[in-house]
Amino acid sequence: MNDTTPSAQTRPGRTLWKVGLFLLIVIVAAVLYFSFGDHLTLESLARQESRLRTYQQYQPILVYGSAFLIYVIVTGLSLPGAAVLTLVYGWFFGLYSGVLLVSFASTAGASLAFLLSRFLFRDAIQQRFGEKLRTFNQSLEREGPFYLFTLRLIPAVPFFVINAVMGLTPLKLRTFWWVSQLGMLPGTFVYVYAGSRVPDLQTLADQGLKAVFEPRQLTQIFLAFTLLGIFPLLIRFLMQTIRKDPVQPEDHQTE
């Protein structure tokens, strides 16, 4: 008699399939990075400035589609270079088109990374730490959008870390999508604006954000994003404190 249940038979196969997919993603990411990473640097793109402009003039749909796909792949696989691409897209497409393109491409890529993290690692994490994470999961289901919005606005937290960690939580994909879309928009606007303000890529490659912003302005932008991210949580905390403030019995004692 066969004592193994269907779940016992399929679980090892499912685990091996996840491990294989994870290794495949790592290999693809490594190949893409080492094959094309040098081509995505500002110095390399600056040397191809005239060629890029020619492509944009004669093949606009192909250029926009390729730019969108490249950004989704870079952010979805957590490859280095998203900040550089944002600056380049600002220079290449202009402020408004660049913001529109980067905003949706970055959210699509973040959602891809979110789903990959959820599919590959969430079950294992929840099975191992499920009891310890129960309170955290319940809290995140209620306050998740506020936490995510705060993390998106604070520049000190790398976006690829946010994508991966949020994939391990019960946060719904649609909530992750629209909160990320809003939360990343201010930073997207600043980077695209910086790229759109430089005359050529060589200037941007030589000076970076300092080609547009002074160090004092960069500090102010950093602080503004941090305060903007903390503000919703502060309001939420104050509202909960007011609602939970108990009325002391002795206040109603009769004389």
Image: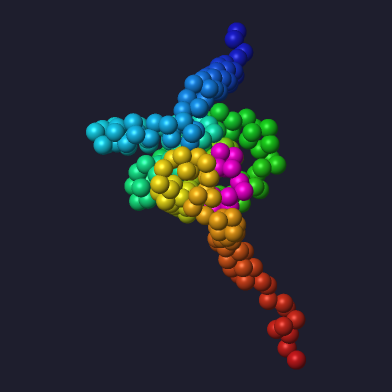
Which range is magenta?
Answer: 149-162
Side of 237 relative to 196 (left or right):
right
**Which residue lies most toward the bottom here?**
255
Residue 28's spot in the image, x, y percent? 50, 21
Was residue 152 drawn as part of the magenta stretch in this picture? yes
**Vertical placement of residue 67 versus 15, above or below:** below
**Which residue lies most toward the top here?**
1
- Between 24 and 50, the one lying in front of the other is 50
**Residue 93 visible in image:** yes
Residue 67's spot in the image, x, y percent? 37, 35
Residue 158's spot in the image, x, y percent? 59, 43
| Prevailing secondary structure of the magenta residues | helix
Was residue 24 drawn as part of the magenta stretch in this picture? no
Residue 32's spot in the image, x, y percent? 49, 23
Side of 199 relative to 208 (left or right):
left
- Between 38 and 147, the one lying in front of the other is 38
**Vertical placement of residue 227 versus 127, above or below:** below
- Between 232 and 173, the one lying in front of the other is 232
What's the residue at 54%, 50% (across, down)? 210
Mark count: 0
- Between 50 and 123, the one lying in front of the other is 50
**Residue 178 visible in image:** no
Work out which quarter of the rendered image holds the N terminus and state it. Answer: top right
What's the residue at 58%, 50% (across, down)? 155
What's the residue at 59%, 55% (across, down)? 215
Colouring scheme, one of rainbow, by chain, secondary structure, one colour: rainbow
